[in-house]
Image (cartoon, helix red, strand yellow):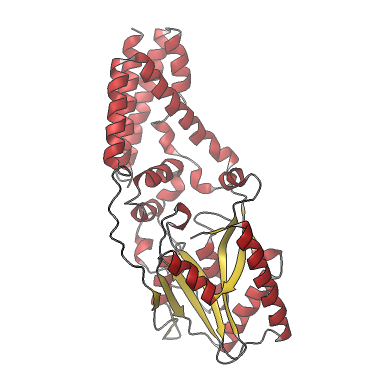
Amino acid sequence: MISHFSSVRFFKYLLIAFFFITSAGAQNANLSEKATVSLLTCGTGAELYSLYGHTALRINDPINNIDIVYNYGTFDFTTPNFYGKFVKGDLEYFVSTSSFEEFNYSYVYDNRDIFEQKLNLTQSQKQKIYTELSDVLASDKRFYTYKFIDRNCTTMVRDVINKVLPQPISTNVPDTQKKYRQILYDYQTDKFYENLGINLMFGAKTDKQCDQLFLPIELLQGIEQTKIDGEKLSTNTATVFKSQQNGAQKSLWNNIYTFALALLAIAYIAYKNKTAAIVYLAVAGMMGLFFSLVGLYSLHQEVLWNYNALVMSPLYIPLIWFAIRKNTIWTNRLVVVSVGCIGIYVVYMLNKAHLVMMLPIIAATLVSLWKVKKSTV
């Protein structure tokens, strides 16, 4: 979904964009009858930002020597306060361009699939897309605020195509039968800790039914299903490059088994030692406080109403205070309330994709709460 953009490549793409804009202007931005507009869909990568694949648009006009790929997924890691802006949700992404040759080389080098769908568009529709992309690239509209589900490299390309169609691209794809969280979960089955982190951060919005094409493979499938006046929007999905299976073995540590063992060890230590139980609850409480408050800071709707704060609760912070001061009444009250919250959480989670990965956390938390309660009697 996202492609990393270093400062060196940034200047290189600026030069490409400048050359493209000036050459397009010299040609009066008129495409020939031989021009084609293609959707490029790239497979998943090893890095977290490439976990869901990538989408781009290709304009190829051999008569005018144009073969440009438009990429809505670029960002600059050197942006001041990069991580703060990303968490807040006001990090600017921008459109960049490259030659198809360079684009192809980059993804082949990373051993990622590349699929191309030439769109069956009229000359007028092709021209509108080309003009739209040229105008965007030459103005401040090339910048946009990234949103994980609602505004990314796929949704931006989808919107550009939909603008010229008499009806929108079909959403009749397998993913629209699932919840957002389940869709994302399925992409990360071999990356447990990344999956855990994402499911801890995301709140209630990701449990809604998917109602749009927001990931690259979904847009590819949507175009395959779309017919305009009885004609398919794309008659063929060509494989430009197929990734090579390298026979990599599954990670020995990045799985639920190592996580469960670690949490069971923590639970055992907490069972034996009150200090360990307090330390665990303090960490869990701080995380719960973050989950509860990040929605007030962040513009990402995905982190709002994070019910994981029921099991990693900010209530543990005052609970620790009362336990240290040996206030038995309030310690017991907060333990009862905390256990009740965990019970509500488990019931709510019964149909959620990430229940199993949360079970070790639930177990360690209950043991720690029991130890603290017992130690203040």
Point out residue 27 in the picture as x, y percentages from the top left corner: 70, 87
Q: Quadrant of residue 342?
A: top left
Q: Quadrant of residue 332?
A: top left
Q: Nearer the viewer, residue 294 or 60?
A: 60
Q: Where residue 207 sits in the image (x, y, percent)?
A: 40, 49
Percent position of residue 250, x then y: 28, 51
Q: Residue at x 44, y 78 (%)?
A: 117
Q: Is residue 273 left or right of residue 110?
A: left
Name above or below for residue 254 compared with residue 100.
above
Toward the viewer: 306 or 138? 138
Residue at coordinates 28% horizontally, 60% vertically from top-left? 247
Residue depicted at 70% across the width and 81% down the height: 23
Instruction: Give the vertical position of 213 relative to 310 (above or below).
Output: below
> How many labels sit on residues?
0
Q: Is residue 63 visible?
A: yes
Q: Is residue 145 visible?
A: no
- The C terminus is located in which quarter? top left
Q: Is residue 366 above or below residue 226?
A: above
